Amino acid sequence: MRINEAIGTRRRFPGKYVIAAALFLVACEPQVATDEDTPAQVVAMPSPAGPGSAEPHLALADDGNAGLVLSWQAVDGDMASLNFARLVQGTWSKPVRVAQGDNWFVNWADYPSVEPMADGRLAAHWLVRRDAGTYAYDVWISLSAEGTSWSEPFIAHRDGTSSEHGFVSLFPWAGKTGAVWLDGRETAGGEHDHEDHGGGGMTLRFGLFDAQGVAVQEGPVDELTCDCCQTDTARVGDSLVLAYRDRTQEEFRDIVVTRYDGQTWSRPVPVDDQHWTISGCPVNGPAIAARGENVAVAWFTGAAGTGQVKAAISHDGGRSFGAPVMLDPVGAIGRVDIAWLDDQDLAVSWMARADKDADLKVVRVHNGEVTGTAVTIAHMSESRRSGFPQMVLQEDALVFAWTEAGETNQVKIATLDASGL
C-alpha cells in the first residue's frame, strides 16, 4: 500500500460530518508555490521531516531552553510514528522518533504533538485505536526529561469506553503535565453520529499528571461541546485560558474560552455571539495566544452562510472580548493560527480560497484593526490532506509549517520577518 493511499483510507469523517465540512472543504489537486509566486520576504526553510510526513505541530518553550519544537506524524504502510526536531539558533536538530505503532488512529484533523513543559522537559501525545469501532481511540501520553528517552506511555483518561478521545492540547502546570481533550465517553461509541443514537454528547475533560504519569487532578471542563474541533490553550499569569468550539442544545456552535486557576474552570465566555447553528461539526477549531493580560483568539465561522475568519482581543485575561475583527469575509477555509508580535500587534494565519486551490495567508492586526495586505506564505491544496498549518513567532521571525499534499505528503517550513508583515 502506497503511503498516500494508506493515509487517505484512514482520514474520513462519516455521515453528516462529511456533509457539514463539505460546505467549506472541496477536494482538489495539490498546487505547489513557485519562486515567482512567493513574496521576497517569505523564505523557504529546509524541513527536518522527510517524505511521508504530515500533520505538523509547532510549539515554543516559554523559557527558551528547548527552542522551537516541530513535531510531525509519518506513515509508512500500516506503521505510523511521531517524530520531532528542535530549531535552535536557526538550525534543526536531528529528528527523534518518540513512538510508533501499527494501531494508531491517523487523521488529518486530530493529530499528535510534542510540547515543551519546563526546564527542557517534553510531553508527547498520540492516538491509539481500540478494536471496537472506527472512531474508538484513546489518548496516549509519554514524558521525557530531555527528549532523547521517553517514559512508558499512559492513557490520559480512565473511563475505558470504546469511544472517541482526541483533539488534545498539552500544557505545563506547576511542574506537572496538563492535558485537555474532547471525550466521547457519554456518546457510547456512537461513530460520530452522537445526536441520533440515544447517547450523550461530546464532552471536554482535563487531567494533570505527575512525572510517573499518575493523575493528580482530573475532571470535566464542559459537558457538551462540538465533536471534532481542535482545542488550544494559552498561559495568562497564574491562569490557563482554553479556547474551544462549544455546543448548545439548540446546536449553536460558537467559540468560547474558559479559565483554569489550578482548582476549577470558570464559566465559558463567548468570544462571539453569532450563534452559528449547524447540526454537524465543521472540523475547524480556534487558536489562542496571550501576552500579559492581553488574550487574542482567531476562529472560523459559517454563521453568515459563507466561510469567514475572525479574531477578537481581550485586555482582561480572557474574561471579556471586544468586537470581532473580520479577516476574511467570503469563502474562507479557516484552519487558523495566531501569535502576538508585540503588546499591540498580532499575526493571524489561515487558509483562504484561491480559485480551485488555497493560499496560506497571514496578516497583521494592530490595536484591533487589520493593517496592510495579507501576505501569501504558500499555495496548497484546499483538501483535508493539507491538514492544519501552524505558525509561531520565534524572536523576530514568524515560522510556518504545513503539509504539502502530493504523490507523497511532506511537511514544509517557511519563515517571514515579522517586520515585513
Image: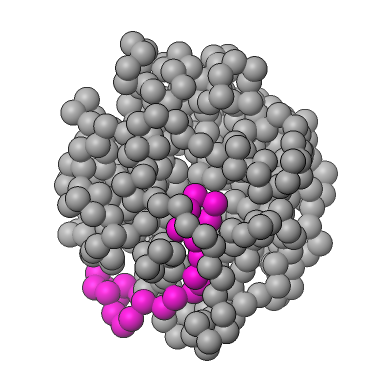
| Residue 215 vertical position relative to residue 46 in the rendered view, above or below | above
Which quarter of the rendering shows the C terminus?
A: bottom left
Q: In which quadrant will I find the N terminus?
A: top right
Front in this rendered view, residue 342 or 34: 34
- Residue 62 is drawn in which quadrant? bottom right
Q: Residue at x 31, y 82 (%)?
A: 372
Q: Nearer the viewer, residue 267 or 189?
A: 189
> What is the x, y in percent for residue 346?
37, 70
Name the quadrant containing residue 170.
Answer: top right
Q: Is residue 353 above or below residue 242?
A: below
Residue name at image x 60 percent, y 26 percent: 138
User: Residue 57: which quarter of the image?
Assistant: bottom right
Residue 320 as seen in the image, left or right of residue 414: left
Where does the image place residue 64, in percent across and percent down from the top left?
63, 64
Residue 59 location, x and y as percent? Answer: 58, 57
Residue 141 is a magenta residue: no
| Residue 345 visible at all | no
Residue 415 x/y as whole percent = 57, 76
Q: Is residue 279 left or right of residue 234?
A: left
Q: Is residue 64 above or below residue 147?
A: below
In the figure, is residue 121 to the left or right of 367? Answer: right
Which range of residues does the magenta coloring cover? 364-386
Residue 378 on the magenta span: yes
| 313 left or right of 406 in image | left
Residue at 51% in and 82% down: 38
